Amino acid sequence: MLHKSGIIGLSAFFIAFSAGFVLATPSTPGATVYFSDLKDGETVKSPFTVHFGISGMSLAPAGTALPGTGHHHLVIDTKLDGEALKQPIPLDAQHLHFGKAQTEATLTLTQGKHTLQLVLGDGMHVPFDPPVVSAPVTITVE
C-alpha cells in the first residue's frame, strides 16, 4: 500500500515527465570520466580505438537505476551544455551511446580536426547533476 506522500511523489514525477521535465540523477562528488589513451592535440589514423575511464562512480548497462552508476556517451564535434545537460542524450552520429557499459570504441572519422568528449549518463541516458564530463579533446585524423 502506498502512503499518501508516496502517491504525491509519484504524481509529481508523472506530471514533470509528461510536461517534458526530466529529474536529474545526482552524481557522486568528485566523479570523473576521461580518455585513458587519447591526448588533446594528438594525431591518429582512422579507424582508431579509444578507451574510456571512470573514477568515483561505476558503470552499469542502460536501464540500470542504481545510485552511483551510469554509462558512457561519446559526443563528437558538438557540445552538450545548458538545457541539453538536463535532457536525455540524443542518439545520432554525433552522440554515441555505450549502453552495455562498454569502456572502448573503434571510431572511423573523416580526415581533419575533430573534438571528442565523454558524458556519463544515468540509466535513462540523462547526464548527472552535476554533470560528469571529460575535458574536450581535439584530435587530427590523418
Image (cartoon, rainbow, N blue to C red):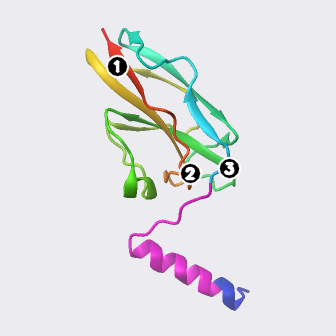
Closer-to-camera residue (48/114):
114
Judge from the rendering whether residue 59 lies leftward or rightward of residue 18; answer left or right.
Answer: right
Residue designated by label 1: 108
Residue 18 appears anywhere in the view: yes
Q: Amino acid at mark 3?
A: Thr
- Residue situated furthest bottom in the rendering: 4
Above-or-below relation of 24 to 115: below
Residue designated by label 3: 28
Question: At x 72% / y 88%, what residue is drawn?
Answer: 3
Name the N-terminal-most of marks 2 and 3. Answer: 3
- Where is residue 71? Give x, y as percent: 56, 42
- Tell me the crowding category of disc 3: few under 14, some 14 to 19, or many 20 or more residues within 10 angstroms, Cα based: some
Q: Say which element carries label 2.
A: loop
Question: At x 70% / y 40%, what residue is drawn?
Answer: 56
Question: At x 55% / y 47%, what residue is drawn?
Answer: 62
Above-or-below relation of 27 to 47: below
- Tell me the crowding category of disc 1: few under 14, some 14 to 19, or many 20 or more residues within 10 angstroms, Cα based: few
Image quadrant holding the N terminus, namely bottom right
Q: Say which element carries label 3.
A: loop
The magenta segment = 7-26
Judge from the rendering whether residue 49 lies leftward or rightward of residue 115; answer left or right.
Answer: right
Residue designated by label 2: 122
Name the N-terminal-most of marks 1 and 2. Answer: 1
- Residue situated furthest left in the rendering: 111
